[in-house]
Image (cartoon, rainbow, N blue to C red):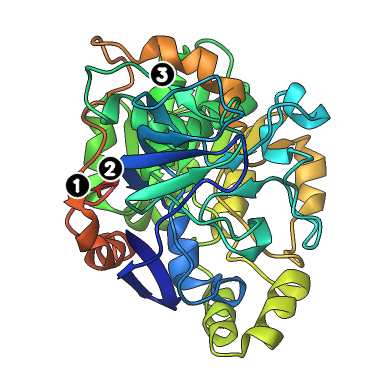
Amino acid sequence: MKAVTWHGRRDVRVDDVPDARIEEPDDILVEITSTGLCGSDLHLYEVLGPFLDPGDILGHEPMGTVRETGPAVSAVGVGERVVIPFNVSCGRCFMCVQGLQSQCETTQVRSHGTGAALFGYTKLYGQVPGGQAELLRVPFGNTLPVPVPYGPPDERYLFLSDVLPTAWQAVAYAEVPRGGSVAVLGLGPIGDMCTRIAAHRGAGTVIGIDLVPERLDRVRERGVTALDVSALGKGLAAAVRDLTGGRGPHAVIDAVGLEAHGSPVARAAHRATALLPDTLAAPLMEHAGVDRLHALHAAIDLVRRGGTISVVGVYGGMTDPLPLLTMFDKQVRLRMGQANVLHWVPELLPLLTDEDPLGVDSFATHRLPLSAAPDAYRMFQEKQDGAVKVVFTP
């Protein structure tokens, strides 16, 4: 089968690899019809090489049709259309029953002290082959796949794999009161969807902050107040407070994470680490990593006293310095974490209708064959051609 594989920093390829196959009685084999390129895939492309091996299959936003089922599978059948959540979760353990599928106790990667395994996402999260491929082996076939109806295009449902539940959880964690205000830092796919969900859930003032003109224009078209951080510079906080009664927003969502602009020292450290042998780089990143925290510091500055910061952008550093005095003094609440996909699906599925209140049918900016993956990764990483969301068709 064809699959997108990692071979080094900024080096992904489409290779012929052995076909995925049933390995356990409750596995299913899914023939992928659409699969997304996620912003967190860029962390693999750029930073997290020490936790990857050449040939690892990438991708964690797939959907398709069931080609084969193991003998213990009864919940889905051959030919059914399914979306696959990016968390590899059993659905039965203590954490899964609590709705914390990202902490599944069956698939936690205890050797690295991390939560549930993820499709296509490094040794830190189980080194499970990913979904940017023609076929995908999916464990826990009775509880993990999300069946969806035939008829509408894939994009109607594809984003249930990650974008929709990740953004929904970020907004839920932000606890924006009805009619309240929220600022979203970073308008990539997750940040963009956060602005849509915040408005849908009743926020009165939604502010989107980025420095890419096409991304700013895209959220303006949906009624979001868009601020260009590169134009405002140090005046960003004042501009946000002017829009929020002088106090700042009730909540700030950091949808940027470790790829933030504005920290040349941390950026240099990331690049230097990429040059080290994996045996040296991996423990350095696990125990002494430093992120580029410009976005998180901006969130702490922008949020009103007593407000909430919801962190959905991925961070990986273990020695990140935080302004705890300011956070304590402002009485800031902080929530974060990988999305618990299956927990939010019941709230999201009823919104995926012809009325399309969240604009999922037109959310993708690029639909490309899987063979175009190397160029697509480069385009997305360099923010070219208005790329916000890329969908591959194997």
User: What kind of residue is marked 1?
Assistant: His
Q: CA distance from mark 2 to mark 3?
A: 16 Å
**Mark 3 or mark 1, whichever is nearer to me:** 1
Circle 2 Cα neighbour tier, 10 Å, few/some/many (<14 / 14–19 / ≥20): many
- Residue extending furthest toward the bottom: 276
At which x and y percent is residue 255? 50, 45
Q: Amino acid at mark 2?
A: Leu
> Residue at the spot x=19%, y=45% of the render?
367
Q: Earlier in the sequence, mark 2 or mark 1?
A: 2
Evaluate if marks 2 and 3 touch, with contact meaning CB atoms under 8 Å apart: no
Q: Which mark is residue 216?
A: 2
- Residue 57 placement (x, y as % from top left): 45, 62
- Label 3: which secondary element: helix
Q: Determine which quarter of the picture holds residue 127.
A: bottom right
Eyeballing the image, is 79 above or below 262? Answer: above
Q: Nearer the viewer, residue 50 or 251?
A: 50
The residue to which callout 1 is attached is 366
- Which quadrant of the structure image shows residue 122? bottom right
Which quarter of the rendered picture does the N terminus lie within? bottom left
